[in-house]
Amino acid sequence: MRVQQSTSFALCLEDAEDLEARKLYQILPDREAAREGYIRIVDESGEDYIYPSELFVPVTLPAAVLKRLRGSARARQGAARRRSAKIPVRATRQGH
């Protein structure tokens, strides 16, 4: 099994705010945050936030696992967009 060279996921080491210990989170590159000792993480809502880097340990995943995780993330984002789409409502007259 081939291993992905760049780290794009991290394991959370302890519960904090909206984070769960022992859970895998996607990392987004953010050099400025890294210089200050933070890491940019995508949370359950699909939004990204910065957290102290000591709450995480970077993990290297096999390429096949990484592909599946990225695919499921895209599927969740698409589903969220579909749920938030405006649905036209037909006007009805009262009494009819």
Image (spheres, rainbow, N blue to C red):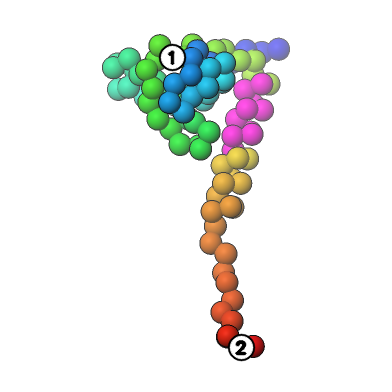
Location of residue 50 by image quarter: top left
Q: Mark 2 falls on what kind of element?
A: loop
Task: Give the overall secondary structure of the magenta segment.
Answer: helix
Q: Nearer the viewer, mark 1 or mark 2?
A: 2
| Residue stretch in magenta | 65-74
Residue 63 belongs to the span the image colors magenta: no
Q: Which mark is residue 95?
A: 2
Towards the viewer: 63 or 68: 68
Residue at the outermost bottom position: 95
Towards the viewer: 83 or 61: 83
Q: Mark 1 falls on what kind of element?
A: helix
Which x, y percent locates residue 88?
Answer: 57, 69
Query: Residue drawn 32% across and 22% down?
Result: 33
Which x, y percent locates residue 16?
Answer: 44, 21
Left or right for 70, reference 47: right
Quickly name the residue at label 1: 55
Which x, y percent locates residue 25?
Answer: 53, 23
Towards the viewer: 34 or 56: 56
Label 1 is placed on what type of residue? Leu
